[in-house]
């Protein structure tokens, strides 16, 4: 290797931005990718980034000071220098990417920060989506970026307007697919090729490492038959957790978290045990017949429940615990608080609905969905899934419809 040459391990967002920066600085860059397809875990992710004080008009009025106030205390004091580096450089990164590539960011004005109670939080504008990208106008390698299961070329703004698969402009989406237009992603677990090779090589060479016990935690479910590179791959649960007629419980049948909390907080809760000593992973999503008529989950649309979904024919068996927990006033420590983040995903779910679980009606069948831990980046468990929902009779079955997180 001679002076001026840079090798980048991995073709995800961080790797490609690093490669772009090195190339912009005059270096000869080689990107190494373990998989046959490009994009890494980013190609399987939701496709949005959180950039405070960014250059988009929808984020006008935001500031680095507000971002520091918001982030302060969310991370241990020992990482204060990393928080400062992020706040100082993230806005410049977003501008750099637009100046040096065809990528164009689009702010999400209705996407609130995950902890709205904190000083410096905003109701929207910091989360950046992407404008539609025409792969046919880019280098041939752009068409080698992985397309995840359940992917639809839909922008965040379009999802905000459509919300439910029965309202999607399916003709437009199919035309985009045929034309090679791409939008944001789906949000699955880490790519199969992300096995920590670069980390192991770096450590063997004496590189310092830190904070390896943390991850981007998400609750997830697996749809039978869905695979990535021959590996069964789950999709994340986002909006389903915030609508009525369902609860999450652990193996003891005890509710352990506010289901509408940000996915990372739910993932953290799944790593803990409840007051009775029962581990919260695996967790179970329990819902009734009315849920299946109003909403959907990956693998089925409302009204079309697959045979692989476990179920109970009466309030007995595991479902009897759900009946107890759904009584008015039950689970007060985990009730939905009506925060902007909670309201975001239950909005428009159905008219007249209220947040949180409802009392179970006698005679309705309960369905139980097991969500188990799956390997994520760095061999740490990850939890993810998908969240397309709609109500009313199904016009067409669209398994695994995704909705942005």
Image: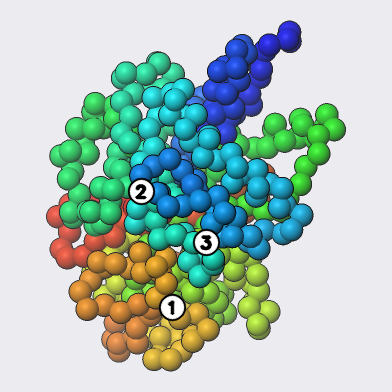
- Residue labelled with disc 3: 120
Does dot 1 land on a helix, a strand or a loop? loop
Choose top left, top right, bottom left or bottom right for residue 123.
bottom left
Comes first in the chain, label 3 or label 2? 2
Does dot 3 land on a helix, a strand or a loop? loop
| Vertical position of residue 3 compared to residue 42: above or below | above
Rate crowding at label 1 as few (under 14), some (14 to 19) or many (20 or more) other CA atoms within 10 Å.
some
Task: Residue at 74% x, 58% y: name it.
Answer: 77
> Looking at the image, which is closer to me, 64 or 166?
64
Residue 303: x, y in percent? 22, 64
> Looking at the image, which is closer to me, 370 or 209?
209
Compared across the picture, whether 269 is left or right of 398 comes to right
Compared across the picture, whether 247 is left or right of 172 comes to right
Does dot 2 land on a helix, a strand or a loop? helix
- Give me the C-alpha separation between circle 3 and circle 2: 16 Å
CB-based contact (under 8 Å), mark 3 and mark 2: no
Compared across the picture, whether 3 is left or right of 59 comes to right
- Give me the C-alpha separation between circle 3 and circle 1: 20 Å
Residue 53: x, y in percent? 49, 47
Label annotation for residue 58: 2
- Residue labelled with disc 1: 337
Rate crowding at label 3 as few (under 14), some (14 to 19) or many (20 or more) other CA atoms within 10 Å.
some
- Give me the C-alpha separation between circle 2 and circle 1: 27 Å
């Amino acid at each position: 290797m001679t002076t001026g040459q840079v090798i980048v391990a991995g073709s995800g967002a961080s790797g490609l931005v690093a490669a772009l920066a090195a190339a912009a600085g005059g270096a000869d860059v080689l990107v190494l990718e373990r998989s046959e397809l490009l994009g890494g875990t980013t190609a399987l992710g939701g496709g949005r980034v959180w950039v405070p004080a960014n250059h988009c008009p929808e984020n006008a009025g935001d500031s680095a000071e507000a971002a520091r106030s918001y982030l302060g205390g969310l991370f241990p004091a020992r990482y204060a220098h990393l928080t400062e580096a992020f706040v100082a450089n993230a806005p410049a990164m977003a501008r750099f990417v637009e100046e040096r590539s065809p990528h164009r960011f689009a702010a999400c004005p209705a996407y609130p920060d995950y902890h709205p109670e904190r000083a410096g939080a905003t109701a929207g504008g910091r989360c950046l989506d992407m404008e539609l990208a025409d792969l046919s106008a880019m280098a041939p390698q752009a068409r080698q970026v992985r397309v995840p299961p359940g992917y639809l070329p839909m922008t965040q703004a379009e999802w905000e307007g459509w919300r439910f698969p029965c309202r999607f402009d399916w003709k437009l989406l199919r035309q985009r697919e045929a034309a090679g237009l791409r939008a944001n992603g789906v949000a699955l677990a880490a790519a199969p090729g992300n096995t920590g090779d670069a980390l192991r090589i770096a450590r063997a060479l004496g590189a310092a490492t830190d904070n390896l016990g943390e991850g981007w935690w998400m609750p997830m479910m697996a749809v039978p038959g869905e695979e990535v590179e021959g590996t069964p791959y789950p999709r994340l649960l986002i909006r389903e957790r915030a609508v009525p007629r369902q609860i999450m419980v652990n193996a003891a049948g005890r509710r352990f978290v506010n289901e509408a909390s940000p996915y990372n907080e739910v993932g953290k809760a799944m790593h803990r045990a409840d007051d009775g000593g029962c581990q919260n992973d695996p967790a179970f999503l329990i819902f009734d017949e009315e849920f299946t008529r109003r909403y959907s989950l990956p693998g089925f649309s409302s009204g079309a429940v697959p045979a692989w979904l476990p179920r109970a024919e009466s309030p007995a068996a595991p479902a009897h615990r759900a009946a107890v927990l759904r009584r008015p006033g039950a689970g007060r420590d985990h009730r939905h608080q009506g925060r902007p983040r909670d309201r975001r995903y239950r909005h428009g779910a159905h008219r007249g609905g209220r947040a949180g679980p409802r009392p179970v009606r006698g005679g309705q069948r309960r369905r139980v969905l097991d969500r188990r831990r799956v390997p994520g980046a760095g061999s740490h468990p990850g939890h993810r899934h998908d969240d397309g929902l709609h109500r009313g009779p199904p016009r067409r079955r669209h398994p695994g419809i995704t909705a942005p997180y």
